Amino acid sequence: MKVNVTQYTIYIGLNDPDTGDQKYDTERCVSILKSVCRSYRIPFSFHTLNGGYVYENGLFTEENTLALTLLDAEESVVQEIAKDLCAFFQQESVLITKAPSELIVVKESLT
């Protein structure tokens, strides 16, 4: 079965905007991210990556980042999740990307 959906990805940097250092270990941040998604009762996937960010004051930092992927969610819910994660991780901002995507569901069993 093929279904056209919207894919959202929320990128959350983990460095503290005041110090430029990561305050909390990545595993703790992942636990918070999972809790937020569970509280919204929304399917998700995520991965960790490294990236760079330029703060509003012009300073550049390289940091660990969580990329949270949500498929076919309501845009208003995606924005609420992004706001929660921005606040919980005390970030200056988080980034949301939105793209059309084709979802292919595969079901199979050995019986």
Image (cartoon, rainbow, N blue to C red):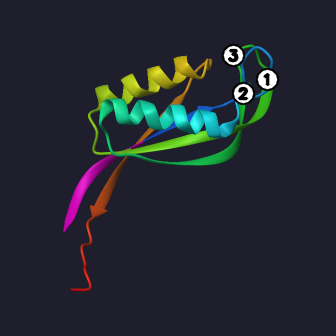
Residue at numbered disc 3: 56
Residue 61 occupies quadrant: top right
Q: Residue at x 62, y 20 (%)?
A: 91
Q: Which residue is mark 2?
A: 15
Span of residues in magenta: 1-8
Q: Are marks 1 and 2 in contact (CB under 8 Å)?
A: yes
Looking at the image, which residue sits at the far bottom? 111
* Residue 16 location (% of width, % of height): 72, 21
Q: Nearer the viewer, residue 84 or 50?
A: 84
- Mark 3 surroundings: few (<14), some (14-19) or many (≥20) residues within 10 A: few
Residue 79: percent from left, percent from top: 38, 25
User: How far apart in space, not on screen, are marks 2 and 3 (Cα)?
Assistant: 14 Å
For badge 2, the amino acid type reads Asn
Q: Say what secondary structure mark 3 lies in.
A: loop
In this view, the residue in front, 16 or 38, is: 38
Q: Work out how far the residue at label 1 is from the one at label 2, CA to CA, in angstroms.
A: 5 Å
Q: Does residue 7 appear to the left or right of 49 in the view shown? A: left
| Within-10-Å neighbours for mark 2: few <14, some 14–19, many 20+ | many
Residue underneath mark 1: 20
- Dot 3 or dot 1: first in sequence order is 1
Amino acid under disc 3: Glu
Dot 1 crowding, Cα within 10 Å, few <14, some 14–19, many 20+: some
Q: Secondary structure at mark 2?
A: loop
Where residue 37 sits in the image (x, y, percent)?
Answer: 39, 35
> What amino acid does circle 1 point to?
Gly
Q: Earlier in the sequence, mark 1 or mark 2?
A: 2
Can you say whether 111 is above or below 77 in the image?
A: below
User: In the picture shown, does residue 39 fall above or below 100?
Assistant: above
